[in-house]
Image (tube, helix red, strand yellow):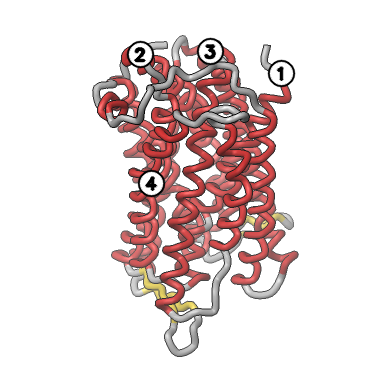
Amino acid sequence: MVKFSEKIGYALGDAAAGGITWKVMSIAFPLFFTNIFGLTVADTATLMLVARLFDVVTDPMMGAIADRTQSRWGTYRPWLIFGAIPLGAVFALLLYTPDFGITGKRIWAYSLYLLMMAVYTAVNVPYGSLLGVMTDNDDEKNQFSSYRMVGAYAMGFVTLLSFPYLQKLVGGSEQHQYAVLGVVLGGLAALGTLACGLLTKERLKPVRAEKFSFKPFADLFRNKPWIYLTLIGVCTNFFNGFRYAVAGYLLQYCLHGDVTVSGLIINYTVFMTFGEVTCMIFGGLSPAFTKWAGSKRRAFRIAAIICAVTSIAFFFIPMDPKYIWVMVAMVILTSIGIGLYSPLLWSMYADVADFATEMNGTSSTGLIFSSGTMAQKFGSAISGALVAMLLGVAGFISGTDPATGQTVVTISNEASVCNMIWSLFSLFPAAIALLIVFLIHLYPIKK
């Protein structure tokens, strides 16, 4: 019987990675780079695309390396234990704006962002792979996945809700605020990752290949469930990526800044916080919902339909601050679907890893789970890059004034930019959700 403390320990791993570092990178970074750091829209789009495409190579390689790791701490846990501090430190540096010129800033951003992706990969791929060696019980896998999602969304809720108030507490310029918060949040991410590595246990031993070979990579493309689940994983992160990346622009330009209601400051992080707490609740209910649905595949399909319908409905809400609670309500309804399918995705990766072991005779758990983080980063990369690119096409221009070093933002066509932002938050994700419904129908494992 798995102890409650181990479930909490596993949850802390994604609280650190998903609830702090990835959440801030997905929601705050696009707006941070264009409006605070001072990159152009083109630089921001290229940065996010190049860095995440870099992960398409590094994630599978990290999975293969992790599968062959042997140490006194196990196969996957040492990567969490010794990667915790680098993860927090690089994250903190990435939120610091150096007093450099345009070229210096560009070099700083690209170098630190690539390094952050590499460190995140070295920690998060082994973290995901842990699920495959902590238990062979399917119900326990679902429970661990559920705890993981609750941990991520609970910490995401705390991070996003507290963000504007912490900014006010820190004071000074926005660049100073983000730098200080980078240190605080980076420290918390390091502690959560370390705690996960120390509190979890590896009960199962992977069936290791004797020597490194490219055969496991080739085997992936003969694994039909892996192909469909990877496409589904990319799409779920497309769905979230569009909404997260554009939320800051939505509040600032469509609603003309933060909305204050009865003393509550609703900025872009708080706006998305309502979704985080909903995802946390329904992530915890996902195992029961899956039992009711009869299979993971059917549960996933229902959840994706919820996301599609509510995203379309958001598009028809008037672009006016007085409808803020209607917008919040629709974010909550959309997040019900996200919360229900998020734990399922990682539990299904465990199923695919078991299928691969039976098919090939050796374990490729790390490689399989690395494709999950690869899909996460690839989906976020393309969506984040597309958001920046499409905003530029619509008339959003940003950059650093070479004379003063100050960040400059101009809007050449306000109506076009606002309509693009609104569509990126609603219609684009809706189309992706409908694609998920189609792909999950084709997914062959019917557990």
Q: SS at mark 1?
A: loop
Mark 1 or mark 2, earlier in chain? 1
Depicted 139 relative to depicted 63: above or below: above
Residue to which mark 3 is pinned = 136
Residue 365 position in % (x across, y down): 43, 24
Which residue: 52% across, 18% down?
Answer: 205
Mark 2 or mark 3, earlier in chain? 3
Q: Are marks 1 and 2 in contact (CB under 8 Å)?
A: no
| Badge 1: residue crowd in 10 Å (few <14, some 14–19, many ≥20) | few
Q: Are marks 3 and 4 in contact (CB under 8 Å)?
A: no
Residue to which mark 1 is pinned = 3
Tell me how far mark 3 sits from mark 4, CA to CA.
Answer: 29 Å
Q: Which numbered tag is attached to residue 55?
A: 4
Q: Amino acid at mark 4?
A: Asp
| Badge 2: residue crowd in 10 Å (few <14, some 14–19, many ≥20) | few
**Res. 309 in view:** no
